[in-house]
Image: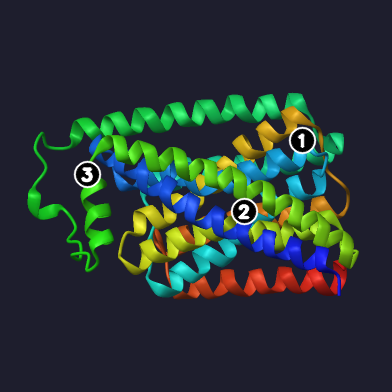
């Protein structure tokens, strides 16, 4: 029995747990602070929540790039984007029909399509994402965030000066003493800032454990880094998006569910891949990485087509189609690729 393998599997599980709980605290804290600024749920989903749930991908890919594990770094970004749309939005759409706002159809999803196309184009052209590619991604990302900021300011001005108390969503009274204390503390801005910082630290620590654990397990079972990045690491770092979007859909917070996925995918390419490539060029191996990138681009195109054909709504048929596509892609990974 290889006790070192057991240890690394245990640390990998600990890394997953830190990622999920850390992202949970990060999102709660950041969204709480944003809520005090009276920003719409869609913008919160596209920015604060998307950044919080993309923090695991950022931590994992940057750590992998620094350690020259470029297969995990690029596989994590592409695999997370595929899982976010085909798996997470698919499941969320099966739970509840997800309306897609007009602003997302005209700005957010086209930006996602642009990001996915640039990832495939620049990666295939130079057979790697280098520092110049990373700078291009970051500049476009800054422009997109500026547009979101302007949209938030416009929506904020359109809101009434004093929000109606009846519109605040009812919350269940916590049953435990700890639950009551935590609910009371969440009303304090300094506490929200504290759990935001602690959550981010847990995400970074969990990301480091995840990368090292995945690398050892991959080496032990003789599985390539890119397949591990596309599967174990990608789904692991997508757990915050999965939990956030599915729970949001179940609670009727559909704007957050959709905005979280679209925003996270944009963050993954422009910010995660962009920042990671500044540390070390991310090798874009053909044909495997090219196929994965095209699948991610097709997933974004499928999202756009379903939203348009579904009259600005993702219904159960769209959800089933996304899940079927996800299963087909994973069959390809483990039957053909491996």
Which secondary structure, mark 1? helix
Q: Is residue 98 visible?
A: no
Where residue 148 appears, as percent x and y from the top left, is 41, 33
Where residue 59 appears, as percent x and y from the top left, is 63, 42
For residue 59, above or below residue 253? above
In this rendered view, identify the residue nearer to me: 218 or 37: 218
In this rendered view, identify the residue nearer to me: 116 or 182: 182
Give me the residue at 44% from left, 53% from top. 24
Asked whether, in this view, residue 240 is left or right of residue 284, the answer is left
Mark number displayed over residue 230: none
Mark number displayed over residue 187: 3
Which secondary structure, mark 2? helix
For residue 114, above or below residue 329? above
Q: Residues within 10 Å of mark 2 (few under 14, many from 20)?
A: many
In this rendered view, identify the residue nearer to me: 110 or 64: 64
Q: CA distance from mark 1 to mark 3?
A: 39 Å
Which secondary structure, mark 3? loop
Residue carrying label 2: 81
Task: Say whether marks 1 and 3 touch (CB < 8 Å).
Answer: no
In this rendered view, identify the residue nearer to me: 190 or 88: 190
Asked whether, in this view, residue 222 is left or right of residue 306, the answer is right
Give me the residue at 18% from left, 65% from top. 173
Q: Is residue 129 visible?
A: yes
Residue carrying label 1: 66
Going from N to C along the chain, the mark reached first, 2 or 1, is 1
Give me the residue at 36% from left, 51% from top. 101
Q: CA distance from mark 2 to mark 1?
A: 22 Å
Q: CA distance from mark 2 to mark 3?
A: 34 Å
Give me the residue at 71% from left, 63% from top. 231
Going from N to C along the chain, the mark reached first, 2 or 3, is 2
């Amino acid at each position: 029995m290889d006790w070192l393998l057991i240890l690394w599997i245990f640390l990998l599980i600990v890394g997953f747990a830190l990622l999920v709980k850390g992202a949970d605290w990060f999102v709660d804290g950041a969204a709480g602070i944003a809520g005090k600024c009276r920003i719409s749920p869609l913008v919160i989903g596209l920015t604060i929540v998307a950044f919080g749930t993309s923090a695991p991908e950022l931590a994992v890919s940057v750590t992998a790039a620094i350690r020259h594990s470029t297969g995990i770094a690029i596989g994590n970004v592409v695999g997370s984007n595929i899982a976010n749309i085909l798996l997470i939005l698919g499941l969320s759409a099966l739970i509840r029909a997800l309306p897609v706002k007009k602003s997302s159809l005209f700005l957010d999803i086209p930006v996602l399509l642009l990001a996915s196309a640039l990832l495939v184009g620049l990666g295939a052209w130079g057979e790697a994402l280098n520092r110049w590619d990373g700078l291009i991604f970051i500049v476009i990302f800054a422009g997109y965030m500026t547009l979101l900021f302007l949209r938030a300011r416009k929506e904020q001005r359109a809101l009434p000066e004093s929000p109606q108390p009846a519109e605040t969503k009812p919350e269940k009274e916590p049953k435990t003493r700890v639950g009551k204390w935590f609910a009371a503390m969440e009303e304090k801005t300094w506490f929200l800032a504290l759990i935001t910082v602690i959550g981010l630290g847990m995400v970074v620590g969990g990301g480091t454990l995840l990368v090292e654990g995945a690398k050892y397990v991959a080496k032990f079972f003789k599985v390539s880094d890119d397949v591990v990045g596309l599967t174990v690491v990608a789904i692991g770092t997508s757990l915050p998006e999965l939990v956030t979007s599915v729970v949001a859909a179940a609670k009727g917070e559909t704007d957050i569910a959709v905005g979280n996925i679209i925003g996270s995918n944009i963050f993954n390419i422009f910010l995660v891949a962009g920042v990671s490539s500044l540390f070390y060029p991310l090798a874009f191996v053909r044909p495997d990485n090219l196929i994965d990138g095209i699948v991610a681009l097709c997933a974004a195109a499928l999202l756009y087509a379903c939203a348009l054909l579904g009259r600005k709504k993702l219904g159960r048929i769209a959800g089933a189609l996304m899940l079927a596509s996800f299963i087909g892609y994973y069959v390809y990974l483990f039957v053909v690729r491996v």
